[in-house]
Image (spheres, rainbow, N blue to C red):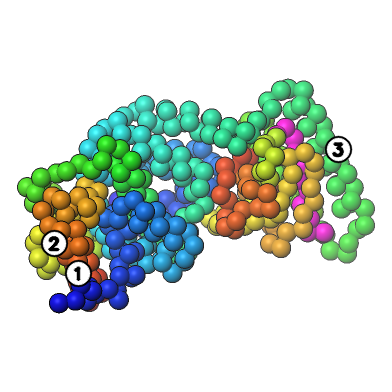
Amino acid sequence: MEGTADRQRLIAALQQVAAGDEAALQRLYDQTSAKLFGICLRILGDRSEAEDVLQDVYVTLWRRAGSFDPERGVSPVTWLAALTRNRAIDRLRAGKGHLHRPLDAIAEAADPSPLASETLERDQAYRQLSTCLGELEPEHAGYIRAAFFDGQTYASLAETAGAPLGTMKSWVRRALLRLRTCLEQ
Amino acid sequence: MSDRDPISGEDDALVAAEYALGVLDGQERVAAERRISTDPGFAREVEAWQDRFDPLTAEIAPEQPGPHVWADLARRLETSSNVVELQLKRSLALWRSATAAAGALAAALALVVAWPKPAAPAPPVLTARLAATAGGPTVFVAFYDPGRKAIVLTPAAVSAAQDRSPELWLIPTGGKPIPLGMAAFESSVQMIPAASVGGGTLAVSVEPRGGSPTGQPTGPVIATGQLTNL
């Protein structure tokens, strides 16, 4: 999804959107809404809530797209996905409380679905991250995946796993440190 | 056994990871968000973690949102400018008088540059008609006099809440917005920007009085227009 040309096109669209170009917003929407909607839907699990958050994301881009700074070297897709995930998480937390998914749902999340075809660079990053997650204790990797994909908090993870909050925090923090070390190798 | 976590020294660095992952809740999440906007080092650390986790999004199947999402969005954008009580007065009379005023100003500026003939041919006066939508009513008219390096921005038909001011930006092709100066909704303002203006797009955003706090547009962009030779 993100070759160099796509990346340049997205950066240009974000800048034109920042300048108030509505046609550029439509181009941006056409290029990114399916990926971003997938993220909203995965976290919220409800189509209409997910559509609501998706709209919020583009309204935010329309008003404040200038906050994307290509000079910091962040990929526009990564930036958009992180913004969207955060909006979806905020909506989840503002809603009826957390979805308490049973442990088998967490285990199920550890079974990766087939990769959509993306560029080699992203495939490599994915493989490296998968390898590093695979080096963690399987339950700890499961907690990280449940937080990432389902918006679980320390509190909901602790409750789901039947572990004290402090213990869960220490497991996840240790896992994050090991992950960083592994990714930096 | 001490109840101190042996990795507590890393706690601070880990907050960025915890925020990026999404496990923080309530006050802790709000505090991390506040820190992102005030602590650039922390913001970069969060971005680094977002980048580390990002490959996981490849596991999420893309899904087309319903066609009504774009339609609703377009409608919301129409009304979002009302948030700052901005009213584009679309009356024909105002539009005519604005066009006439712009014409007079153009003639005056043309005289200014035409009269004292410099030895080398002067770079052309640039002008831009700034509108909310392509082909829509003019909201501001801008003239750039390269001799004096001055821009005059004249409002045509626009007003906004008292505590807001319009700020003028230059958007070079493929570049980030460059602030040119603060304008006004009620009167023409002349500004001598630090940046050189050779072409590109002008944009006006609505900012807090005194201008954007970030150096980039933070409020809605209410009008844009391409600079062209007069």
Q: Residue at x 12, y 57 (%)?
A: A163
Whether residue A38 sits left or right of residue B185 in the image: it is left
Which amino acid, by three-letter code, is at mark 3? Answer: Ala
Q: Which residue is drawn at 41% across and 66% down?
A: B42
Residue bearing mark 2: A140
Magenta residue span: B148-158
Gap between marks 2 and 3 measured at Cα: 72 Å
Gap between marks 1 and 3 measured at Cα: 70 Å
Task: In the rendered structure, find residue B1 and report the number of the disc placed on it.
Answer: none
Which amino acid, by three-letter code, is at mark 2? Answer: His
Q: Residue at x 54, y 30 (%)?
A: B79
Q: Please say whether residue A144 is one of the residues in the magenta stretch.
A: no
x then y, percent, for residue B15: 32, 64
Q: Please say whether residue B151 is one of the residues in the magenta stretch.
A: yes
Residue bearing mark 1: A174
Which amino acid, by three-letter code, is at mark 1? Answer: Arg
Q: Do the numbered discs 2 and 3 sit on residues whose CB atoms are within 8 Å?
A: no
x then y, percent, for residue A142: 13, 56
Residue bearing mark 3: B104
Which structural element holds mark 2?
helix
| Closest to the observer, B60 or A16 | B60
- Please, which chain is the residue tagged with disc 1 on? A
